């Protein structure tokens, strides 16, 4: 049902020796409803990261896709959480490992309020995340490769090298705005 961008932060990219995001596929079975409990019996070592989520109204196919093309192709922007999980102990992997693990994809939640891209300042959109009532991290969209729309342009151009594209109607997780936060039984 969609595409996610992974490894969008400068720190993660440096660790993996890459300069553009990974892409991975989002399946219908990954969708969690607002307010749902995390199905911990399906998960190994889940971590949660806040993301800006796009729905697409136009097909995007590289090469040559720009940030402006991406902005023009977005239908709505939502707040969301991705729940990542890794089959590798302590998330210790090399690039081919994490590619084969579908970029640690597990679950995601999309907020109920969608805003037209023209009315969102993606670079300066702010997020704060707290765990069990205590502040953990804050960030803005700039943490996602400088601009989540630029991150998506890079990803679409790389998909084109494999003959792939982003279709109208897809949901896109644009990448963690903060570091991922480990979550377990009893946590909110
Ligand atoms: O969504 C992500 O950025 C995850 C990409 C894979 C690497 C990781 O598990 O941090
Ligand atoms: Mg993510």
Image (cartoon, grey):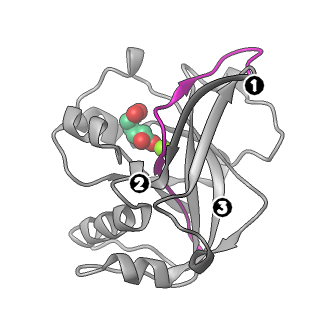
**Element on which disc 2 rests:** helix
From the viewer's perspective, is 80 left or right of 123? Answer: right
In this view, the residue farthest toward the left is 17
> Which of disc 1 and disc 3 is earlier in sequence?
3
Where in the image, quadrant-wise, is ligand 1 located?
top left
Residue 78, labelled with which disc? 3
Residue stretch rendered in magenta on the structure: 169-187
> Which of disc 3 and disc 2 is earlier in sequence?
3
Residue 6 seen anywhere in this rendered image of the structure = yes
**140 shown above or below 107:** below
Q: Contact, CB < 8 Å: mark 2 with mark 1? A: no
Q: Which image quadrant is residue 28 in?
A: bottom right
**55 shown above or below 43:** below
> Rounded to the nearest whole Å, what is the CA distance between mark 2 and mark 3?
16 Å
| Camera-nearest residue between 102 and 79 | 79
Q: Residues within 10 Å of mark 1 (few under 14, many from 20)?
A: few
| Camera-nearest residue between 161 and 183 | 183
> Rounded to the nearest whole Å, what is the CA distance between mark 3 and mark 1?
20 Å
From the viewer's perspective, is 132 left or right of 164? Answer: right
**Residue 4, horizontal then vertical, whole percent:** 47, 54
Residue 188, labelled with which disc? 1
> Rounded to the nearest whole Å, what is the CA distance between mark 2 and mark 1?
26 Å
Residue drawn 38% across the image and 82% down it: 68
| Callout 1: CB less than 8 Å from ligand 2 | no
> Which of disc 1 and disc 2 is earlier in sequence?
2
């Amino acid at each position: 049902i969609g595409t996610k961008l992974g490894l969008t932060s400068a720190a993660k990219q440096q660790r993996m020796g890459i300069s553009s995001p990974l892409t991975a596929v989002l399946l219908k079975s990954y969708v969690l409803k607002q307010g749902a409990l995390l199905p911990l019996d399906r998960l190994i070592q889940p971590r949660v990261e806040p993301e800006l989520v796009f729905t697409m109204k136009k097909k995007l196919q590289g090469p040559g896709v720009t940030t402006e093309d991406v902005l023009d192709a977005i239908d709505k922007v939502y707040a969301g959480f991705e729940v990542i999980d890794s089959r590798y102990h302590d998330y210790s992997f090399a690039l081919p490992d994490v590619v084969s693990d579908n970029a640690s994809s597990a679950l995601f939640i999309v907020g109920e309020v969608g805003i037209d891209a023209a009315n969102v300042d993606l670079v300066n959109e702010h997020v704060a995340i707290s765990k069990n009532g205590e502040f953990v991290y804050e960030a803005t969209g700039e943490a996602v490769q400088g601009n989540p729309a630029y991150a998506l342009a890079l990803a679409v151009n790389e998909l084109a090298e494999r003959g792939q594209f982003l279709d109208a109607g897809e949901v896109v997780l644009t990448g963690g705005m903060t570091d991922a936060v480990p979550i377990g039984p009893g946590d909110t």
